[in-house]
Image (spheres, rainbow, N blue to C red):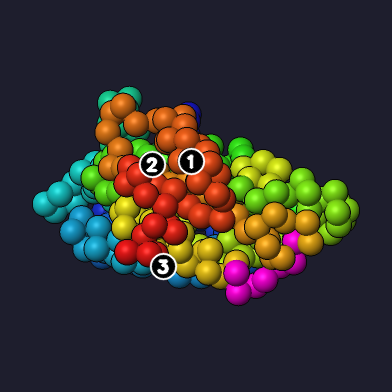
Amino acid sequence: MVLLKETAVIPTPPPSAIEPTAARFTSSHAENAPFSVLVVEDQASMRASLVKELQHAGVTEVMEAADGQVALQLFKLRRPDLVLLDIRLPGLDGYGVAHQMRESEPGDWTPIIFLSGLDTDLDVWRGIESGGDDYLVKPVKPIVLVAKLRAMRRLLDMRRRLISMSAELHLANQRLNEMVEMDALTGLVNRRGFDRILHAEIIAARRDGTPLTLMLCDLDHFKRYNDSCGHVKGDECLRAIGKLLREVCMRPRDVASRYGGEEFAMILPKTPRSGAMTFARALGKMLRVRALPHPDSPLGEVLTLSGGITTCIPDESTSAESMVMRADQALYAAKAQGRDRFFSFEMQMDTIEQRGN
């Protein structure tokens, strides 16, 4: 940013921060929102002149500091919209104060205008390097001060609008991602979302050294259900299963997804093998209680499901593909042993066997 410098002849003592003139600007800016300014000036007479001129210009709140430490405390506590900062201060000078102000607001920005009787290229350079945005030479003409206020306010308002737009865009993108990763029929996470979440949970479990469980399940003889009841009833059945899986995945990070067709998957972070089998038995019991009719099932009159379970504490060799492969093999074993059960890949045991022990 190019700094604008106001040159003026320094008047004889007593010094004043504002050059005497009849010209005064009240803000014609349409913005009537509150606007606060922190004035950092060690000389009381100069500080009073600045405060009076800022109030006359329409600034709603003016804070005062006579040294750098007080200025930093006010800056952190009150977060002014603009800082007018004298370079020559007792103790920590204005350059140091500006540097610490910038360090205290990572990701944010408050305009800082330096005030000084100095007017050299080196002073301007030092001001920019320490975090300043503009430079005014004392005594300051009221018309120039008000012009600077308006310019900095416009920049600040523009930045706030950009931040607001960025936040709205981020929220819109988040909602779009949720829509893209949602199965329209069941309301569960779809295959795309499943792939992303499983990959992320593997990384998290590897980092934390915690167990991660993946379940793949398949509605038993669902083709016969569609053939006997029709696809409209089949869709209603899939929606009912989606509702059941959402209810059973109660913890915040548990995820139920529609893997494809009549196949579903559940990602259960921080779930050991024993906990996974308990979860599977509970799911099977809940499905039996719902007693969704299946008029053409060889297994009985109600809908059942089969599932495969894999549980591990992920290491560097663990991938989403390897976990899906193990769960799929366990699902195949559950079907081979008669369906209507879950089979654990690691325990080589199904829920029917465990229930009988």
State the residue position of label 3. Answer: 62
Task: Identify which residue, 191 or 326, lies in the foreground.
Answer: 326
For the point 11% across and 52% down, which residue is it? Answer: 91
Which is closer to the viewer, label 3 or label 2?
A: 2
Which label number is shown at residue 345? 2
| Element type at mark 2 | loop
The quarter of the picture where residue 322 lies is top left
Can residue 54 be seen?
no
For the point 72% across and 56% down, which residue is it? Answer: 297
Task: Please name the amino acid that badge 2 sits on.
Answer: Phe
State the residue position of label 1. Answer: 333
Residue found at the far bottom of this picture: 289
Read off the magenta span. 288-294
Which is closer to the viewer, label 1 or label 3?
A: 1
Left/right placement of residue 230 relative to residue 223 reads right
For the point 35% across and 44% down, which residue is it? Answer: 348
In the rendered image, residue 273 lying in the magenta stretch gets the answer: no
Task: Please name the amino acid that badge 3 sits on.
Answer: Val
> Is residue 156 positioned above or below 58 on the image?
above
Q: What crowding class fits label 2: few (fewer than 14 Cα within 10 Å), some (14-19), or many (20 or more)?
A: many
Can residue 209 be seen?
yes
Dot 2 or dot 1: first in sequence order is 1
Task: Please name the amino acid that badge 1 sits on.
Answer: Ala
Q: What crowding class fits label 3: few (fewer than 14 Cα within 10 Å), some (14-19), or many (20 or more)?
A: some
Task: Identify which residue, 172 or 107, lies in the foreground.
Answer: 172
Q: What crowding class fits label 1: few (fewer than 14 Cα within 10 Å), some (14-19), or many (20 or more)?
A: many
Whether residues under marks 2 and 1 lie with C-beta atoms below 8 angstroms apart, the answer is: yes
| Element type at mark 3 | strand
Residue 51: x and y, percent?
40, 65
Which label number is shown at residue 112? none
In the rendered image, residue 292 lying in the magenta stretch gets the answer: yes
